[in-house]
Image (cartoon, rainbow, N blue to C red):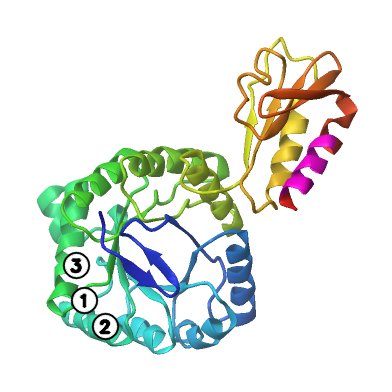
Amino acid sequence: MSREVKIGTVKIGNGNRIAIQSMTTTKARNIDETVDQINRIADAGADIVRFAIENEEDAKAVDKIRQRVSVPIVADIHFNHKFALECIAGGIDKIRINPGNIGSRERVAEVAKAAIKADVPIRIGVNLGSIEKQFAEKYGKTPKAMVESAKYHASLLENEGMENIVISLKASDVKTAVAAYRQMAGECDYPLHLGITEAGTVYQGIIKSAAGIGALLLDGIGDTIRVSLTANPVEEVKAAKALLSALDMYDAPTLVSCPTCGRCNIDLPPIANAIERYLENVKKPLKVAVMGCAVNGPGEASDADFGIAGGQGNAVFFKKGKIIKSINENEILDVLFKEIDLWEK
């Protein structure tokens, strides 16, 4: 089991709930826009929000942002360690550095000392695409190179007395990332932040992330996750919640809907899509079933809190597998919306 690390008000590792993370698309120096997006990401269900620090103006904006958001915030630092020092002074909850471009050992040590004094954890974010030359030459661009890079930079922090360390080992290739995380999990007890970097658009990114992150979570590996998508960050949070919910690691509403076939005599996809959208605003856990026919109806969805099974232009409404009544096809959404609203109350 990984050790516990505290990021603001959120505890990760040591058996704590998997934390959901996303990243803003705004410039930190645009404070109003950044605060607004952080709050929208948090409202969607994110536990931690990261944003990029590109220059001194971004770094100096941290204290103002910190005052206007309640979710823990993480500064993403590349190339200039002084930005990390400025962010720590500004009240950031966590620092993420890339070992491949943060600078000399002396600069890393300076950041470590400041972080220790402020009780700010540091994530060592190793990306295969920017792996340091010394590890790439020795091991090639492989999982082994990523792990050795992370271990080396963790040792630099450890030499300064740093213990609040989080590690990520991201690659756009799913197999490479999974192999690196599995190796790392066997060689350290630091919390691991999971992600498949540059995963792609919503469609492809969710598939790749589900394959990689899902495999690791089922292995018992991982303490925080980000589903990286070329999309609005809120979509990342929604995907992460759905992934964790599918693995019974997050209490969220669940939609069960069957694949359509020739037995289905109602227009099922629009119904399922409408219920999925409606459930996005539901906070309590419940399972709703939208089934196409009696074959896949109440029996196979008996663990659902309630749902419908289609017939010839009509459907049966059931709860926990027990049929309650028959309804017309045009009543389905109204009946299910009403039941969802009652459940929320």
Task: Say which mark, if any, is on residue 116.
Answer: 2
Marks 2 and 3, how far apart at CA: 14 Å
Q: Amino acid at mark 3?
A: Ala
Q: In which quarter of the view is residue 327 placed? A: top right
Q: CA distance from mark 3 to mark 1?
A: 9 Å
Whole-Å distance between the Cαs marked 2 and 1?
6 Å
Dominant SS of magenta comes to: helix
Answer few, some or many: residues within 10 Å of disc 3's Cα (few below 14, many 20 plus, some between 14 and 19): many
Front residue of this view, candidates 19 and 35: 19
Q: Which residues are magenta?
A: 335-343
Reading the image, the residue beneath label 1 is: 162
Crowding at dot 1, Cα within 10 Å, few <14 / some 14-19 / many 20+, comes out as many
In the rendered picture of this protein, how many numbered marks are placed on residues? 3
In the image, residue 312 lies at what x, y percent? Answer: 84, 13
- The answer to which of marks 2 and 1 sits earlier in the sequence is 2
Residue 239: mark in rendering: none
Looking at the rendered image, the disc whose residue lies closer to the viewer, 2 or 3, is 2
In the image: residue 35, left or right of residue 12 = right
> In x, y percent, where is residue 167?
28, 61
Task: Decide if residue 281 is on the left or right side of residue 248.
Answer: right
Q: Which residue is mark 3?
A: 154
Who's the residue at 47% across and 51% down the image?
227
- Above/below status of 90 relative to 176: below
Q: Quadrant of the N terminus?
A: bottom left
Q: Is residue 167 magenta?
A: no
Q: Are the residues tagged 2 and 1 within 8 Å (C-beta)? A: yes
Q: Nearer the viewer, residue 215 or 56?
A: 215
Q: Residue at x 24, y 45 (%)?
A: 182
Residue 198, given in percent of the width and then of the height, sits at: 43, 50
The amino acid beneath tag 1 is: Met
| Residue occupying the far left of the picture | 138
Mark 3 falls on what kind of element? helix
